Image (cartoon, rainbow, N blue to C red):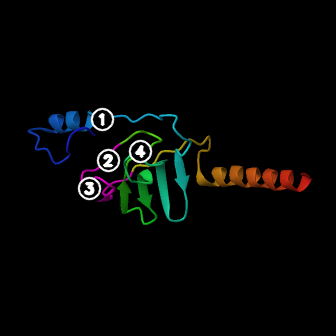
Amino acid sequence: MKGDRKTLCKSVIDQAQLESDIEIYAWTGANYLTQLCTNEMIALGGGSSPGKEGTFGLVIKSDLLNGYSSHSQTFGNPPLCNESENGSSFEIVNLEVWTMTPCNDIQEAEKMEMARLFLEHHRREES
């Protein structure tokens, strides 16, 4: 969001307008560090901008309750919250997750993933 969520609004409509005024940081082409998922975090964007510290544009920690944001070369973004210049931590109040899968449920997704792993395993054996 471009504006501060703590901005006092006179109505729900004013609040919705404030929250719909967003800034988009598209891929810069500087690197391919678009996303990383480990047992410790989900991260977007990587590399620090010249003269700026930071390792990830956005990190959600494994507890899904905390994260931090820093400059990243991948998206050319500043820290996405204003606590400090070199990486700002935040508490997650609400998290919305989207998927890009053709599957309709978890069982179907697990079956598709197992088939992919099976094929990958046998492809390596043949090499």
Q: Nearer the viewer, mark 1 or mark 3?
A: 3
Q: Is 57 contained in the magenta span?
A: no
Element under disc 2:
loop
Residue 49, label in figure:
4
> What separation in Å lies between label 2 and label 3 (alpha carbons)?
10 Å
> What separation in Å lies between label 4 and label 3 (alpha carbons)?
16 Å
Q: Residue at x 43, y 48 (%)?
A: 48
Element under disc 4:
loop
Q: Is 92 contained in the magenta span?
A: yes
- The residue identified by callout 2 is 80
Q: Left of 17 or right of it: where is 29? A: right
Percent across and percent down for residue 57 are 41, 48
Residue in front for this viewpoint, 53 or 114: 53
- What's the residue type where badge 3 is placed? Ser
> What separation in Å lies between label 2 and label 4 (alpha carbons)?
14 Å
Crowding around mark 1 (Cα neighbors within 10 Å: few <14, some 14 to 19, many 20+) is few
Determine contact: label 1, label 4, CB under 8 Å: no
Lower position in the chain sequence, tag 4 or tag 3? 4
- The residue identified by callout 3 is 84
The answer to which image quadrant residue 122 occupies is: bottom right
Q: Residue at x 73, y 55 (%)?
A: 114
Residue in front for this viewpoint, 95 or 87: 87
Q: Nearer the viewer, mark 1 or mark 2?
A: 2
Lower position in the chain sequence, tag 1 or tag 2? 1
Q: Residue at x 41, y 61 (%)?
A: 64
Q: Which residues are magenta?
A: 78-95
Element under disc 3:
loop
Determine contact: label 2, label 4, CB under 8 Å: no
Lower position in the chain sequence, tag 1 or tag 4? 1
Residue 22, label in figure:
1
> What separation in Å lies between label 1 and label 2 (alpha carbons)?
11 Å
